[in-house]
Amino acid sequence: MTIKEARAAGGKYTVYFALAGMAPAYVIMAAMYSPDEYLNLGWIADVDFKLNLLVGGAILLLVSYVLGGMAGRMIIIEELNSILVGVISGLLTLLVTAFLSSWLGFFREVSGDSHGFADYVCRPTLLLTMFGSVPAAIFGILLGLRLKKMR
């Protein structure tokens, strides 16, 4: 397999796993935005940050494709530890996506507020990383094992 093919495979499978990772993220947000003991799966209609979620999803897919291509090259061509590369790729995708996505809220909401960076960039990045680390690591392991089969 060539480097170009390895990058394409890594990018493709990482996007698949990123899409699969959106499901637990949606359920976690549904649990957080449910007003009572019932899980409100229609929570997205009630929030005022739909644009942030849409932009965040687009950034996730773009970042996962780029980092997945690098992971594909490292696992398939360079034959590095597939589980370690997969976990690092998953966690790095989550962190970069959370950080970049948070800036939209910062630019939309902050008007000279001195706590804007902490409230709209640091806090969402921290919360997304806290709640998303375990699913990102699990999907990273699955990605690494999938790409290892392609050697």
Image (cartoon, grey):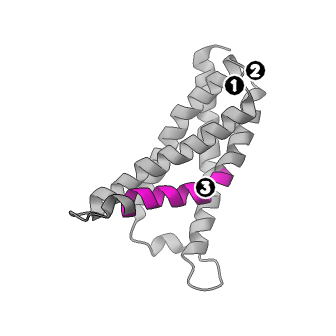
Secondary structure that dominates the magenta span: helix
The quarter of the rendered structure image containing the C terminus is: top right
Q: Give the residue drawn at x 64%, y 36%.
A: 13
**Label for residue 151?**
2
Residue 75: x and y in percent read 69, 25
**Label for residue 75?**
1
Camera sees residue 25: yes
Q: As drawn, is 111 to the left or to the right of 23?
A: left
Q: Nearer the viewer, residue 26 or 88?
A: 88
Residue 128 drawn in magenta? yes
- The answer for how far apart the CA atoms under marks 3 and 1 are is 23 Å
3 vs 2, front mark? 3
Q: Give the residue drawn at x 57%, y 73%.
A: 32
- For the residue labelled by badge 2, is the local secondary structure a helix, a strand or a loop? loop
Residue position for label 3: 132
- For the residue labelled by badge 1, is the local secondary structure a helix, a strand or a loop? helix
Say whether marks 1 and 2 touch (CB < 8 Å).
yes
Residue 45 drawn in magenta? no
- The answer for how far apart the CA atoms under marks 3 and 2 are is 29 Å
**Mark with earlier residue (3, 2):** 3
Q: Nearer the viewer, residue 72 or 15?
A: 72
* Number of numbered discs on residues: 3
Residue 97: x and y in percent read 48, 47
Residue 33, placed above or below residue 117: below
Residue 90, placed above or below residue 56: above
